Image: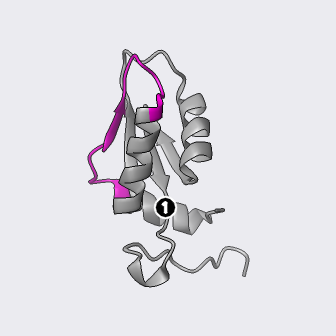
Amino acid sequence: MKLSSKQRKYLETLAHDLEPMVRIGKGGVTPTVIQSVIDSLKAQELVKVKILDNASVEKDEVADVLVEHANCTLVRIIGRVLILFRPKDEEKKRRIVLPADRDSD
């Protein structure tokens, strides 16, 4: 999913007060971590993932793996925190409605 700058900023604003739901430590990105991200996205749509200081993985690598396996969109990387977004499949069940993309007008 491609986000416009307006949509990205909107999601960043919503994520500001969220606590990280998933933390990645020295074990790196394991299948359990990936499943935790998938489960969190199913429930919340917008999730923060914290990469702890003792993790031996790079934030860009973590982002690539999670986006691929969790089928989500990377909103932003801020320090060692990733903000991920995946809307629910059914429109009427979505909790987050993105503003219309008017950047191209």
Residue 73: name its quadrant: bottom right
User: With respect to residue 48, does 101 lie above or below?
Assistant: below
User: With respect to residue 9, does 91 lie above or below?
Assistant: below
Q: Give the magenta-colored segment's residue range.
A: 15-31
Residue under pointer 1: 9
Three-letter amino acid code of the residue under disc 1 = Lys
User: With respect to residue 68, does 7 lie above or below?
Assistant: below
Residues 90 and 48: in front is 90
Residue 25 pos. (x, y %) = 37, 22
User: With respect to residue 29, does 63 lie above or below?
Assistant: below
| Quadrant location of the N terminus in the rendered image | bottom right
Tell how many labels. Answer: 1
Q: Main secondary structure of the magenta part?
A: loop
Residue 1 lies left or right of residue 95; in this view the side is right
| Quadrant location of the C terminus in the rendered image | bottom right
Residue at 73%, 76% in the rendered image: 104
Residue 69 lies left or right of residue 27; in this view the side is right
Residue at the right extreme, as displayed: 104
